[in-house]
Amino acid sequence: MTSADMGARPTFPRFIDTLSQRQTPALLWYSVQGERIELSGRVLNNWVAKTANLLVDECDLEANQLLALPKRLHWRSLILALAALRVGAEITFDGERSAQVFAAFDPAECAKADAEHRLVLASEPLAPRFNGELPVGALDYAAEVRLHPDVYMGFPEPDPQEKAWEGTSYRELMLALEERVLNLDNQLGQETAALCLQSRDLTTGSLTQALVALSAGYAVLILDPHIEWDQERISRVLGDERAQLYPAQ
């Protein structure tokens, strides 16, 4: 997606709407041998919509409220981040801050979180529910998200002046994406279909890289940072997916 496609006033909902029109891969996840997940732009949009509806309907999340995200880089945590931005919430990776919603893969983290609502995420591929004991009052993301519509029914769009995260407004985020998409297109060849995130954690930096890649029409490739990777397998995955490591910008 180029700046012309986004129009004179780029917004996060417009970014999501454009993503939903893609039938090609938008998110690729590799973990242990044989574990591969592929989500097209349309399917990724469905997951984002379901998650956003869950956040609004079950967790009472409103625009401008704080959602604490897991630091673990995982396809589910990335979807949760996209959903929070679709709602217009402010996201943080500081689990010590008091939040409307706190999400984690570790139920022990959820149990001690200072939050109105808590979500436990399953790390297993396409797990229908969390395989373990939930803290009292916590929601099982994998089980609950499937019950929600795959069309977002909540707030129309974020206030461009409000914070997407500390130090960055939604307007600043979308303008930065436009600029970085142009820089990225100048660095890559036409044969590239996916970009591999090199971070071990989900941060504002790795999230921004994912947003830039998606905005530019590439798939985001995540190699599970919680397992050991040898260079031979990395090279094989990159070749199979016509991917390259996310370039320094």
Image: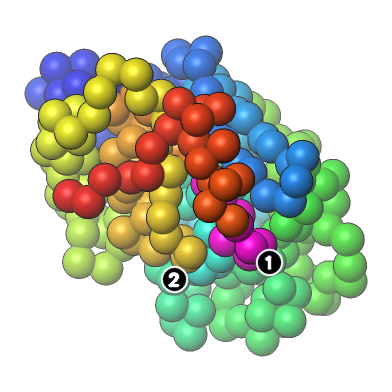
The local secondary structure at tag 1 comes to: loop
Q: Is residue 168 above or below residue 190?
A: below
Dominant secondary structure of the magenta stretch? loop
Quadrant of the rendering where the N terminus is positioned = top left
Which residue is tagged 1?
A: 105
Residue type at the position of mark 2: Phe
- Residue 48 in view (yes/no): no
- The span from disc 2 to disc 1 (Cα, nearest Å) is 13 Å
Which residue does the image show at 48% across and 85% down from the upper left? 96
Question: 10 Å neighbourhood of mark 2: few (<14), some, or many (≥20)?
Answer: some
Residue 131 picture location, percent across and down: 88, 61
Which residue does the image show at 75% across and 68% down from the upper left? 138
Residue type at the position of mark 1: Phe
Residue 120 picture location, percent across and down: 72, 64
Q: Would residue 67 be found to the left or right of residue 18 on screen?
A: right
Q: Quadrant of residue 158?
A: top left
Q: Would residue 237 be found to the left or right of residue 197 on screen?
A: right
Disc on res. 93: 2
In magenta segment, residue 115: no
Which residue does the image show at 83% across and 70% down from the upper left? 134
Q: Quadrant of residue 199?
A: bottom left
- The magenta-colored residue range is 222-229
Q: Is residue 65 above or below residue 88?
A: below
Residue 136 picture location, percent across and down: 82, 76
Q: Would residue 3 be found to the left or right of residue 70 on screen?
A: left
The local secondary structure at tag 2 comes to: loop
Q: Quadrant of residue 171?
A: top left
Which residue does the image show at 69% across and 37% down from the upper left? 36
